Image (tube, rainbow, N blue to C red):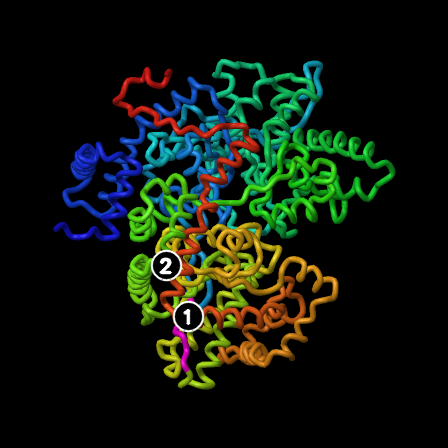
Amino acid sequence: MARPLTDQEKRKQISIRGIVGVENVAELKKGFNRHLHFTLVKDRNVATPRDYYFALAHTVRDHLVGRWIRTQQYYYEKHPKLGLDIEELEEIEEDAGLGNGGLGRLAACFLDSMATLGLAAYGYGIRYEYGIFNQKIREGWQVEEADDWLRHGNPWEKARPEFMLPVHFYGRVINTENGTKWVDTQVILALPYDTPVPGYMNNTVNTMRLWSARAPNDFNLSIFNVGDYIQAVLDRNLAENISRVLYPNDNFFEGKELRLKQEYFVVAATLQDVIRRFKASKFGTVFDAFPDQVAIQLNDTHPALAIPELMRILVDIERLPWSKAWKITTKTFAYTNHTVLPEALERWPVELVEKLLPRHLQIIYEINQKHLDRIASLFPNDDNRLRRMSLIEEEGGKRINMAHLCIVGSHAVNGVAKIHSDIVKTKVFKDFSEIEPDKFQNKTNGITPRRWLLLCNPGLAELIAEKIGEDYVKDLSQLTKLHSFVSDDIFLREVSNVKQENKFKFSQFLEKEYKVKINPSSMFDVQVKRIHEYKRQLMNCLHIITMYNRIKKDPKKPFVPRTVIIGGKAAPGYHMAKMIIKLITSVADVVNNDPVVGNKLKVIFLQNYRVSLAEKVIPATDLSEQISTAGTEASGTGNMKFMLNGALTIGTMDGANVEMAEEAGEENLFIFGMRVDDVAALDSKGYDAKEYYEKLPELKLAIDQIDSGFFSPKQPDLFKDIINMLFCHDRFKVFADYESYVKCQEKVSQLYMNSKEWTRMVVKNIAASGKFSSDRTIKEYAKDIWSMEPSDLKIPLPNEPREVLNK
């Protein structure tokens, strides 16, 4: 009898079958040996792990190229929609960290789903030389290191210099008898790099195109005439800085000139590329057909300048009348809002836009004038409404509200979870939705089950396939079939065993990396996400301190052992987030080194949380912490990954948690805390943190310990800024939810002691997670916004007759 496959072998088998196809495994091995041979002949005699990686990557890329070309031929001949602008396309290959937090990872899931659904879609973004920083923890503090991810090259990408395009900045605007001209500009070249995006088991390979900035050869060389040739050549670096580094802010707007340049750079290059493809199609220059062939989704406001840029191209270059150009523009664009936090909304100073993009400012003013004329005709003498709805904000210096520009310039606007879309429609953009209610939609986020189950948790994926077949991988709604097994003791035991294996493997990783002895049978209680006050890692920390105090108070009292794992990056300039990391690591030092606590409670701060680390921790998690203040998290996608991988959720009624509770039944999640209406009522009444501090002895003790230096004896006032914030200006009301959170955590511990009932609840959650596939999300975008139909056509392999395409 053959031995069972290890997880690693299962993962390898799934990867080969999904991307390459079973029939080509022998060919793959032959190609691998050939690539490895040439690597060694060229360089050295002994293969390194990197040699093996590059040989394998080049082999798989070779295999995809034929399908990639065949896919593009099919799209060209069938003329479906031509393009899709998704900004911030990140982390396709392991830890190409080209985006911040969930927004970028969502784009990667969407690309996977679009290829799997056979949609003719392109993902566009910037090929940052340095991605999101690598996080080191030194003496408990976050330290940032540059992410030099291209240092050894990137075998998946292909430079396409034949499609290099000019992008213009600065200059001035002149009016001529042939129309408006933008002249005397500085030109930067956009060099595209293409990465193949394979669909699952359908031979489709879509394209992710990332732009890199290059200085033209004559850049600043007029200076040579006055003798400073060397300086002129060195100044080329300034031009190429546009694609040098990703801004690491998540949910926070930083109005820097370089960032605005980046936003225009990706937009200008992408639109030229899309229009080039459109003109090469049978439609040529008949721009009336453009919105029928092209749909561009603005992934948050970062690519908002695409709206005035398309208007500039249509009006100034293609010489279309304004009204016709505007109709084409609004029918082409749709906008996804990803946050309601006011500090995250982009508001660019008019002065900066005028300097960098003078023609675009004129176009934005014209759009705004026509928009306000319409509002004034609908609501005469309502100056307040005009002020609220203007694209230009006047208070504290003139600024362009980019969300307003996106709403006015798009035919559809959506939020990313039901509760978020409701807040967008009834609160944040209420004035706009009153005028055009049908423009506003919801598209609840999703995750790709290929990466977030098959790849990262092959043991569970295989177990599910044994029970319900393999079709669920492309139709996650089939997971509902697992409801039949919630009382199957053997299946429950198998699910529990898979989780235990994942935990054991991860505990070995933690012991190796952090030198802390982990109890693998303890509850793995995990909160991994960007560090932000609204995500309330502080509340988790207060619960850790409370558990610690309870153990110390009565060491002999039974205690359900926990390993609390917190991870995430803080934006380098976000002082409070960095202090929160220091507090967590300081509490961990005390807890982990207290002999009275022993193995009952351990605290780990996961360094440098990223996709490859998520793939390890998520399958090993028992309890998923989704504890943001109600009304602040747009959706969340980590919550979905944990649910699919067999963790139970402790969370507030926020973001997609609400729909998770709807799908699984609220009784199968650990829901606590204020709802959105409760938060609003508390705001009206006035939130007084001191009231909770004085009423709750365990909260008071924890806060007093932080305040007195119990966790920082060498610097007793180290956490004074945290204490001050919690008492005086905590917008996210940690104390108000503390009591409900701690009581809910007690219910968690109680259930965890009953392994069978815990696992039964786990299976109910997995069975209810089908809605949260990004395939479902993308089907909804395609049907409701892009007017496209997914295709289940399996594109013929490169060695099959090409005529099949035309059938």
**Which residues fall within the magenta stretch?**
558-564
- Name which quarter of the figure residue 631 lies in: bottom right
**Magenta includes 250?**
no
From the viewer's perspective, is the residue at label 2 or at label 1 nearer? Answer: 2
Tag 2, which secondary structure?
loop
Residue 24 image offset from top left, x and y in percent? 22, 32
User: Who's the residue at 82% across and 32% down the image?
Assistant: 377
Residue closest to the eye, 798 or 269: 798
Q: Identify residue for label 1.
A: 603
Q: Is any atom of residue 42 visible in this view? A: no
Identity, as a three-letter code, of the amino acid under mark 2: Ser
User: Who's the residue at 39% across and 60% down the image?
Assistant: 760
Classify 10 Å Cα crowding around label 2: few (below 14), some (14-19), many (20 and above): few
Residue 138 image offset from top left, x and y in percent? 42, 66
Between discs 2 and 1, the one toward the N terminus: 2
Residue closest to the eye, 611 or 42: 611
Residue 425 image offset from top left, x and y in percent? 67, 44
In which quadrant of the rendered image does the C terminus lie?
A: top left
Residue closest to the eye, 292 or 483: 483
User: Who's the residue at 36% across and 65% down the image?
Assistant: 756
Marks 2 and 1, how far apart at CA: 34 Å
Which numbered dot is residue 487? 2
